[in-house]
């Protein structure tokens, strides 16, 4: 049956696809660390697998997270993924029912209408239902055409750029469903087995009196487009479709990124759908920098042609990571690349002499940044004194950096030396709490220090506890206060409420339009090693314009670096939470004698 | 109609006013403060030759009074509007609108707010002062001891605070602070001979007459130590002294120094009202936010707006003698323009 050779492109394509996927995935899984492999084995027969399947259903098929960011874009992704899935599933069921058996070759299910024209139970239902799904997918295809033309309508201001192989894959994908429509329409015209869409198209074809060679040509096109798409898939962005499934599974089993770039990183990199949502999240655009957004970086990582220039030009603000619907750990991926890219410099810290640490309850580590904003340092100490806390100012005289800036720069080994030094001092102090006034330090203490039982507290958390326990009692003022979420504290460490709680107690707190996990970056980030000052200023101004929209009396933040950055951009008072808090307490103590007089 | 409306009565405004009066122009002088004289009122002795700043101020007071030049004090100019006939309407904080043929901007500069460089601890640590504060203290002739009454053993000056500093948004050099530091350091030595004085600089810009000589005198005669390197941070010790962390970039070594007083050599910034003029009459400003001269060589008093002229430090940092020269040439430029 020479006509039926049209299924060959499809079969070859599917074969190539399955073999390449198998090779890639097996090699990635083999490369997993021993512990990670155990995690997979142990997790496999638990509820984690079920929960992963649920997530795969929600994220890979329904694309609910893209929906949340942008309904139209979500609909487009969903129509392709979910629609196609239903089409394949119901197509198989249809062919099983028709054959009254489960042993049907895949091409018979895929090209069912070509092979079978006769009536069987439910034939009409399937014809209409499959047409309905096809129509649904076609609406998505139409949106995809339109998106390339008018990407603004979708809220995505910039679209990703394409390479030739991507273009071939894209065109074949775009062709698949219209080709199926025409093929089934042609068959319907000859054999009358169409549903409400293909049947109607068949009517139109009948008008032109098409013959079976036209029909066959259409099926060839359909099969070829499928074949081409399958073959290109592993080498293009569409690799994300199967890889995201793997990514979700591994994530559910608790497998996380490591400091080095390894197969887990690769799985994340290949899971990027290039939806482009991260592009819009990035504030670099305001400074007309548009080549370093995460989607481009991931693409470069895949193609192994990432330049240092792009890699290091990023604030590590985490806005893209927060926006990414796939949940890729974009910041850590970038850092792992930086670790790989950065050569070891002479980072001897021999001058850090070890000294005996006095015993204390609370160890306060201010860090370099707080040393550069003495107002914050003094306020933190003042509050601790007022509250009568037994504390030790760990790095008052000679302190080593916490290591986070080196970590961000990819100088992992150097950072490790500082971490070891500080860690020993903290442990030796016998403190039960480590108090930190800088989110940058806070992040690295939490993530990389392994301090065991010691409570690590940012000053906003700690001071809220002191207030709630009655150690300090601030007084409310009439000042209108807005709050800027520092990237490392908010997105970095998930602390959003404590600073707000404190501010509500000491002034008139006002929300700003973009806040919490959406909050903008102050632009001062140490994560970027190449951004010029004028570019930083542009980003800073954009952020300030959102924060200062309603003319607050005080712009509050909880990070010395944000403070330092903002101070140079506005005449409105910029203060750290500790500074505002200390004002509100001091005022009260100043009033005390008067009150005593009243009592007498 | 007024011929020339002069905004600002610092040295520049005063000098230009006297000259324009002599050439028979009808002039008004507007000043936002309650006194004339501008920044120089607060200074003690002036470089390069130690002339007393008060003498300069009183000289100009006499000149102004002798000519009975109409001066509006407490009048803040908020906008300059050009009318279709080429004349100007000048808006102020008072209800009066001044109409005039030409405007001479002599608004000078404002001092950099040292609180914006928090790492130096100004207004946080008691014994951190600015060069302007120190100048005032000299002028008031108070006992040259610390406010807490302790004697001075060692003091340090930090150059370029708020100038030549991208992070502060000021790329430019404020020009007079290097020589001011030399002047003030010598003065400290004269008052307290035993005091040790350190100056932390990036470059020393001794551009003017006698400046280099003063710098050499500071080292040779007075033993003042100049250290090339930027101070990174300042901390206060229990007895309210200051611990300065810096790097000597010539010797390539980091070091710490404890001092009794720290003086920040603050730079000059464009006045806030310059931005208002930019808005109201399209006045062109340079990247430094100071007013851009129409031509640096042949027409440094004119601006891109016909009929609006400048005198003094509103075009960028200038010393008093440069200011006076610039103001004189402003008088000539304005007169020529009116004669046309
Ligand atoms: C610490 C320090 C020490 C110095 N020591 C010396 C020295 O020893 N020798 C020396 O040669 N130079 C010295 N200088 C430089 C000197 O101060 C300037 O050269 C001089 O002040 C410039 O004069 P001016 O008239 O241009 O500006 P200013 O002195 O700034 O006067 C401008 C006037 O305009 C007024 N004004 C501003 N805006 C408005 C407005 N919108 N409406 C109305 N009025 C307005 C202001 O109130 C002010 O009175 C020193 C500078 C500093 C910072
Ligand atoms: S990184 Fe995330 S947000 Fe960016 S294109 Fe890829 S999937 Fe989309
Ligand atoms: S981390 Fe921030 S600066 Fe970097 S690419 Fe993402 S959004 Fe842009
Ligand atoms: S004059 Fe000297 S201190 Fe002032 S900004 Fe220029 S280099 Fe710095």
Image: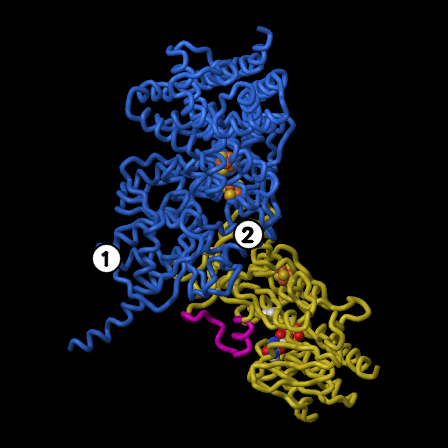
Chain colours: A blue, B yellow
- Going by the image, does B165 lie left or right of A261? right
> Which numbered marker is on residue A471?
1
Q: Label 1 crowding class (10 Å Cα cut-off): few <14, some 14-19, many 20+? A: some
Q: Residue at x 37, y 47 (%)?
A: A365
Disc 1 beta carbon < 8 A from ligand 3? no
Residue range (magenta): B133-149
Mark 2 vs 1, N-terminal side:
1
Please, which residue is most extreme toward the right here?
A: B340
Q: Which mark is residue A539?
A: 2
Residue A93: x and y in percent read 39, 19
Say left or right for A22 vs A450: right
Write the residue at 60% across / 35% down. A308
User: Decide: marks 2, 1 in contact (CB < 8 A)?
Assistant: no
User: Chain letter of disc 2?
Assistant: A
Q: Residue at x 49, y 49 (%)?
A: A521
All told, the count of numbered labels is: 2
């Amino acid at each position: 049956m020479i006509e039926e050779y049209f299924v060959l492109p499809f079969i070859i394509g599917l074969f190539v696809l399955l073999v390449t996927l198998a090779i890639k995935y097996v090699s990635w899984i083999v490369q997993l660390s021993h512990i990670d492999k155990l995690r997979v084995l142990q997790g496999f027969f638990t509820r984690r697998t079920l929960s992963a399947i649920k997530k795969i259903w929600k994220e890979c098929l329904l694309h609910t997270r893209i929906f949340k960011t942008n309904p139209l874009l979500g609909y487009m992704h969903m129509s392709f993924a979910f629609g196609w899935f239903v089409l394949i599933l119901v197509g198989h069921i249809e062919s099983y029912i028709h054959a009254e058996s489960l042993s049907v070759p895949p091409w018979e299910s895929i090209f069912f209408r070509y092979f079978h024209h006769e009536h069987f139970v439910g034939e009409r239902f399937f014809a209409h239902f499959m047409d309905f799904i096809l129509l649904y997918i076609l609406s998505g295809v139409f949106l995809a055409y339109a998106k390339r033309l008018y990407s603004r309508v979708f809220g995505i201001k910039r679209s990703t750029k394409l390479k030739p192989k991507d273009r071939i894959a894209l065109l074949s994908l775009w062709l698949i469903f219209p080709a199926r429509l025409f093929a089934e329409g042609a068959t319907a015209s000859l054999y009358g087995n169409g549903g409400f869409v293909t049947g109607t198209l068949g009517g139109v074809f009948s008008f032109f009196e098409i013959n079976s060679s036209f029909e066959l040509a259409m099926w060839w096109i359909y099969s070829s487009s499928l074949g081409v798409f399958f073959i290109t898939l592993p080498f293009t962005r569409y690799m994300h479709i199967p890889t995201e499934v793997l990514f979700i599974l591994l994530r559910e089993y608790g497998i996380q990124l490591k400091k080095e770039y390894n197969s887990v990183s690769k799985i994340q990199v290949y899971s990027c759908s290039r939806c482009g949502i991260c592009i819009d999240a990035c504030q670099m655009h305001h400074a007309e920098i548009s080549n370093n957004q995460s989607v481009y970086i991931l693409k470069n990582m895949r193609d192994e042609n990432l330049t240092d220039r792009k890699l290091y030009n990023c604030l590590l603000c985490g806005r893209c990571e927060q926006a990414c619907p796939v949940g890729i750990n974009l910041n850590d991926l970038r850092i792992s690349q930086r670790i790989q890219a950065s050569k070891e410099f002479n980072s001897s810290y021999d001058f850090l002499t070890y000294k005996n640490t006095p015993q204390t309850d609370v160890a306060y580590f201010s860090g370099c940044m707080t040393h550069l904003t003495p107002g914050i340092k003094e306020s933190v100490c003042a509050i601790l004194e007022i509250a009568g806390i037994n504390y030790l100012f760990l790095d008052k005289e000679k302190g080593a950096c916490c290591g986070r800036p080196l970590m961000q720069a990819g100088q992992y080994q150097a950072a490790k030396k500082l971490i070891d030094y500080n860690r020993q001092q903290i442990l030796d102090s016998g403190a039960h709490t480590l108090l930190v006034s800088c989110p940058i330090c806070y992040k690295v203490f939490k993530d990389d220090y392994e301090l065991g039982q010691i409570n690590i507290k940012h000053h906003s958390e700690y001071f809220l506890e002191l207030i709630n326990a009655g150690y300090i009692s601030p007084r409310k003022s009439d000042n209108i206060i807005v709050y800027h979420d520092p990237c490392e504290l908010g997105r970095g460490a998930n602390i959003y409420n404590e600073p707000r709680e404190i501010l509500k107690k000491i002034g008139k707190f006002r929300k700003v339009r973009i806040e919490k996990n959406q909050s903008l970056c102050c632009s001062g980030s140490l994560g970027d090693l190449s951004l010029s000052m004028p570019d930083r200023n542009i980003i800073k101004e954009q952020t300030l314009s959102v924060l200062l929209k309603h003319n607050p009396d005080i712009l509050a933040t909880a990070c010395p670096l944000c403070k330092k950055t903002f101070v140079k951009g506005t005449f409105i008072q910029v203060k750290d939470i500790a500074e505002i808090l200390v004002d509100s307490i001091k005022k009260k103590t100043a009033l005390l004698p008067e009150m005593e007089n009243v009592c007498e | 109609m007024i011929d020339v409306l002069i905004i600002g009565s610092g040295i520049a405004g005063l000098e230009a006013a006297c000259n324009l009066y002599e050439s028979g122009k009808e002039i008004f002088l507007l000043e936002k403060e309650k006194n004339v004289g501008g920044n120089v009122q607060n200074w003690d002795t002036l470089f390069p030759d130690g002339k007393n700043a008060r003498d300069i101020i009183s000289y100009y007071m006499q000149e102004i009074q002798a000519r009975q030049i109409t001066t509006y004090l407490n009048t803040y100019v908020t906008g300059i509007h050009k009318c279709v006939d080429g004349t100007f309407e000048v808006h102020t904080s008072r209800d009066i609108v001044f109409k005039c043929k030409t405007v001479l901007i002599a608004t000078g500069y404002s001092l950099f707010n040292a609180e914006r460089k928090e790492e130096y601890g100004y207004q946080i640590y008691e014994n951190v002062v600015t060069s302007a504060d120190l100048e005032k203290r000299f002028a008031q002739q108070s006992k040259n001891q610390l406010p807490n009454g302790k004697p001075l053993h060692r003091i340090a000056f930090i150059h370029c605070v708020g100038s030549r500093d991208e992070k502060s948004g000021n790329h430019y050099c404020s020009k007079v602070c290097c020589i001011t530091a030399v002047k003030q350091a010598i003065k400290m030595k004269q008052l307290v001979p035993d005091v040790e004085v350190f100056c932390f600089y990036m470059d020393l810009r001794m551009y003017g007459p006698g400046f280099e000589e003063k710098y050499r005198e500071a080292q040779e005669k007075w033993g003042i130590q100049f250290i090339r390197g930027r101070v990174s941070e300042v901390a206060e010790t229990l007895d309210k002294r200051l611990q300065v962390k810096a790097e000597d970039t010539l010797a390539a070594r980091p070091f710490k120094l404890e001092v009794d007083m720290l003086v920040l050599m603050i730079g000059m910034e464009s006045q806030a009202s310059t931005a208002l003029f930019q808005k109201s009459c399209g006045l062109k400003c340079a990247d430094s936010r100071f007013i851009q001269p129409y031509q640096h060589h042949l027409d440094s008093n004119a601006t891109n707006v016909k009929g609006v002229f400048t005198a003094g430090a509103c075009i960028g940092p200038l010393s008093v003698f440069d200011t006076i020269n610039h103001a004189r040439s402003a008088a000539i430029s304005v007169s020529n323009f009116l004669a046309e």
